[in-house]
Image (cartoon, rainbow, N blue to C red):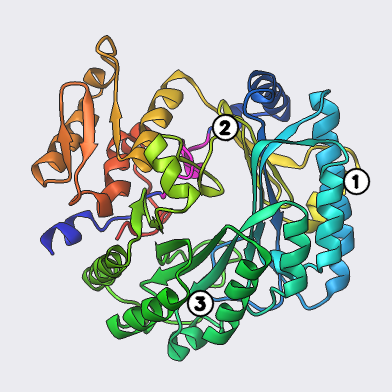
Amino acid sequence: MDLIQKYNVPGPRYTSYPTVPYWDVNTFSAKKWINSFKKSFLESNQQEGISLYIHLPFCESLCTFCGCHKRITKRHEVEEPYIETLLKEWKMYCDILGSTPRIKEIHLGGGTPTFFSSENLKKLIHGIFKYAKRAEGYEFSFEGHPNNTTREHLQTLYDLGFRRVSYGVQDYSLQVQKAINRIQPFENVKRATEEAREIGYTSVSHDLVFGLPFQTLGDVIETINKTIQLMPDRIAFYSYAHVPWMKGNGQRGFSEENLPGGEEKRILYEIGKKLFSELGYVEIGMDHFALKTDALYHSMNNGNLHRNFMGYTASKTKLMIGLGASSISDSWYAFAQNVKSIEEYTHLVENNVLPVYRGHCLNEEDLIIRKHILNLMCQLRTSWDKNEDYFEQLPDVLESLEELKQDGFLILKEKELIVTDEGKPFIRNICMAFDVLLQRNKPDRELFSMTV
């Protein structure tokens, strides 16, 4: 428990490196972003294709644990204008690229993608492929809310090529659900899961969260016991990220005193991990578990597991374009984020302006560090060439790694680092040792959630 207290510090989840607070926005420009994604497209479109992340921000009610960018409304007339704007943004990208994109991945995130009618989702995907074609081995996925994901949603998206759906479950305790304003009976999750399988989806994922307000060990065990009745192909078992200082986030429906502490959260995680393992789930990277029949497990074994702003994916594309308000794009050489306001996003696109408002162009050092952090997050190990003396020039990195080694979290060889089983729960801390930007400029305000 002393190690939990020692390492339970604010830290990034490393969906990117550099992390968003450390982007050099002053040297970034839309022109640089355009040059970056054109370069990436030319290098990778024919071989691997590109990925699309499409942000659908509307929700009918506010979940008070959520830190995503969303718009709360029950007015469904917002659907069609937003989709029209998404398709105009996509056409702008296609016009700049100058040749037909081959799409390897599509992920519909939110918000609540199933806020949109099945007919409007069909209109969106058909509009995307008006200017693109499918890459070989494509994988399309979406996030579904079990309360409003209908059989029609599932059938429509299946017919469009979607084969993976993830359902946000969080916790089945009624007290916890009331605290986070997400009342969601087990029967709804069961129906949505079984209907997806009946239709033919090959991968159904459930998202569970530990460390929620009022959550007890009994609650987590009960939630896992109910979850395994349905045996989802993947399980994301996230530590609740408490970031109430973020603008526009709803994490104010409970008090800090209602949250489990670091040691309690570690116990919740370890019990969950044990139960999953006993049922045949394999731990994948950070926070994820998969059955051996799932593509995520195979990608880990084959060394193809990738991590980006969509989370873990079974294949890698160099270029990921984010469409929609607040979406983030990644060309490997640069990141770019769209404006967050739906009104501003719409205004810019209507005026044929890419709605990017900030980003970061990676320098040589960024690319080196990014490679190692990605290796650690996906493969739990990394190595460097025998002629590469980069880390010898960074004594702070070596000093931090030595301390993590002494605490039993990693095996450090001359040119290789391997994360131990004891170190897996602390993978964010291990990555932080490589994060030279974080080490050089410790934040003087709250930026990240706690690592435990």
- Amino acid carrying mark 1 in the image: Glu
- SS type, badge 3: loop
Q: Quadrant of the C terminus?
A: bottom left
- Quadrant position of residue 392: top left
The mark nearer the N terminus, 1 or 3, is: 3
In this orientation, which residue lies closer to the viewer: 374 or 276?
Answer: 276
Magenta stretch contains residue 20: yes
Instruction: Evaluate if marks 1 and 2 touch, with contact meaning CB atoms under 8 Å apart.
Output: no
In this orientation, which residue lies closer to the viewer: 141 or 89?
Answer: 141
Q: Quadrant of the N terminus?
A: bottom left
Magenta range:
13-23
Label of residue 405 in the image: none
Q: Residues within 10 Å of mark 3 (few under 14, many from 20)?
A: some
Identify residue for label 1: 350
Residue 325 percent location from the top left of the image: 72, 52
Residue 113 percent location from the top left of the image: 70, 64
Instruction: Evaluate if marks 1 and 3 touch, with contact meaning CB atoms under 8 Å apart.
Output: no
- SS type, badge 1: helix
The mark nearer the N terminus, 2 or 3, is: 3
Identify residue for label 2: 360
Q: Work out whether residue 438 can be spotted.
A: no
| Gap in angstroms between the C-alphas marked 2 and 3 | 31 Å
Identify residue for label 3: 252
In this orientation, which residue lies closer to the viewer: 240 or 6?
Answer: 240
| Gap in angstroms between the C-alphas marked 1 and 2 | 25 Å
- SS type, badge 2: strand
Please report the residue visible at 27 percent of the width from the left and 38 percent of the height from the top.
433
- Amino acid carrying mark 3 in the image: Arg
Q: Residues within 10 Å of mark 2 (few under 14, many from 20)?
A: many
- Quadrant position of residue 69: bottom right
- Amino acid carrying mark 2 in the image: His
